[in-house]
Image (cartoon, rainbow, N blue to C red):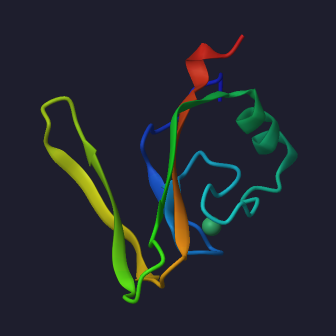
């Protein structure tokens, strides 16, 4: 592979959790299942430089009251021109009094040329 991804951005479906993931991924970022068992492919994947572009975490809590709350978690991705290229409702749910949720958003970047 010469440290390069053959088709950057090409996707496939994880056979385990059905998420849309990068074809170059050796481990599904959603369910953490290993997707390649070929030794050479795994070595190539490990050789690729990977870094975390960002990781944001926040929590919210329904204070001690009588009413349950509802929430929705939405993630959107915009390009250089500010156009939305993806938008997804990650999850919705109810929050009873004194319950809390923590949301973590992480972005991993695969930069094969940056290795070494
Ligand atoms: Zn998966």
- Identify the residue at the far top of this view: 116
User: Residue 18 vs residue 82: left or right?
Assistant: right
Q: Nearer the viewer, residue 35 or 91?
A: 91
Q: Is residue 19 above or below residue 1?
A: below
Q: Nearer the viewer, residue 94 or 91?
A: 94
Q: Residue at x 87, y 45 (%)?
A: 39
Q: Quadrant of ligand 1?
A: bottom right
**Image quadrant containing the N terminus:** top right
Q: Residue at x 48, y 82 (%)?
A: 97
Q: How many discs mark residues in the rendered view?
A: 0
- Identify the residue at the far right of this view: 39
The x, y position of residue 67, in whole percent, is: 37, 88
The x, y position of residue 11, in whole percent, is: 46, 54
User: Residue 80 vs residue 45: left or right?
Assistant: left
Q: Residue at x 27, y 55 (%)?
A: 86
Q: Quadrant of residue 4?
A: top right
The x, y position of residue 46, in whole percent, is: 77, 34
Q: Is residue 57 above or below residue 36?
A: above
The x, y position of residue 34, in whole percent, is: 76, 59
**Image quadrant containing the C terminus:** top right
């Amino acid at each position: 592979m010469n440290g390069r991804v053959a088709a950057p951005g090409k996707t496939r479906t994880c056979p385990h959790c059905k998420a849309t993931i990068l074809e170059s991924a050796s481990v599904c970022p959603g369910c953490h299942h290993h997707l390649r068992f070929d030794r050479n492919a795994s070595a190539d994947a490990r050789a690729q430089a990977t870094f975390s572009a960002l990781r944001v975490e926040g929590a919210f809590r329904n204070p001690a009251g009588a009413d349950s709350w509802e929430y929705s978690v939405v993630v959107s991705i915009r390009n250089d021109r500010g156009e939305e290229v993806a938008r997804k409702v990650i999850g919705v749910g109810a929050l009873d009094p004194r319950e809390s949720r923590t949301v973590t958003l992480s972005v991993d970047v695969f930069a094969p040329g940056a290795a070494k």
